[in-house]
Amino acid sequence: MALAPAMGRLMKLLAMLLLSAWAASATNYYVIIAGLGGEPEYDMQFAKWATELDHELRQNGPNARILTLTGNNATAQHIHELFSQLAGEMSPDDAFALMLIGHGSFDGIDYKFNIPGPDITANELAAWLNRIPAERQLIVNMTSCSGASIPALARKGRIVITATKSGNEKNATVFARYWIDALHDPAADTDKNGTVSALEAFRYAQRKVAAYFDSEKLLATEHALFTDTGSASAVRDPEPQNGQGLLASSFPMLRAQPAATAGLTPEKQRLVAKKQELEAKIDRLKYQKAEMPEAEYRAQLSALLLELARTQAEIDR
């Protein structure tokens, strides 16, 4: 069954975003904010997670800027000032990721991120984020009640991930622990290309959260959600069938560093780049399947897989 015209246009837009090269001059900005714990135990835990996340993201090399606010520095004024600074500093070619750690609340109307002083509502946060010119944006809200922030935060060109499915899941979350683990556990890199994408990190953390509650024999009190199509109708399982996941598959959380291929000959480096391009084409094709005749889809997929196999064989020589 063909997708609606609006969905078709959206898929083309996302494909264009994926095709855009990561310009050499572009910078990846990662902002980490740890809010109030309310109790010493949580204060220490949130600060620890923020420090660990900061450390992992610094493995991205010199083209990554990591900015972290914790404790008394994580006030609404300081956050607003930081976003205003970035709005004037960043360019459309840059990538921007915001990760929120801590507690959230929901009163049935507004989601709020709990920080020292006045809390920030999702609408206030969205207004500040909308001024940042980066065309590739990722928001990972790992707080309790975070699902209630999706309607305000979702927009085209932005990936939104939340630890909970609604504002009614109010218990402290463990999603942040496993989001951090995704950046140093080789198992998170499922396509083995040396880069952990936002989509891979989401799926890894989601699996680990479910396993945690199973192992502890506890009723799960958090269910992560995902949207990268601009729709506020987030899903638990992004896949080509529901149109979710294409943008996040091209957003790197942890990128392979040049040192990993520095020992390869120029020809081998060219082949590695070709392999990555073919893999991206296969991913895009999967998201276009619903719009294509089955025979055409199979023919294109077979051709790409054959070319990928040939390229891999040349790399392995």
Image (cartoon, rainbow, N blue to C red):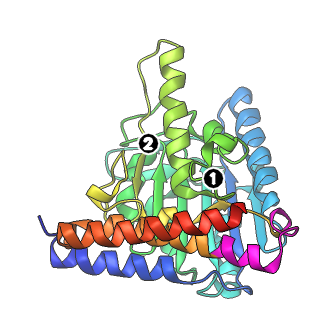
Secondary element under disc 2, as helix, strand or loop, is: loop
Give the distance between the C-alpha atoms of the residues marked 1 and 2, in whole angstroms.
Answer: 24 Å
- Dot 1 or dot 2: first in sequence order is 1
x, y (%) of residue 270? 70, 78
Amino acid at pointer 1: Lys
Residue appearing at x 43%, y 51% in the figure: 111
x, y (%) of residue 198? 56, 57
As drawn, the residue found furthest toward the left would be: 1
Q: Main secondary structure of the magenta part?
A: helix
Does the residue at mark 1 contact the one at mark 2 (Cβ under 8 Å)? no
Q: Is residue 269 magenta?
A: yes
Side (left or right) of 218 relative to 47 = left
**Residue 268 lies in quadrant:** bottom right
Side (left or right) of 312 relative to 264 = left
x, y (%) of residue 50? 74, 47
Residue appearing at x 63%, y 63% in the figure: 313
Magenta stretch: give its range.
Answer: 259-273
Q: Residues within 10 Å of mark 2 (few under 14, many from 20)?
A: many
State the mark number for residue 224.
Answer: 2
As rendered, which of 275 and 28 lies closer to the eye? 275
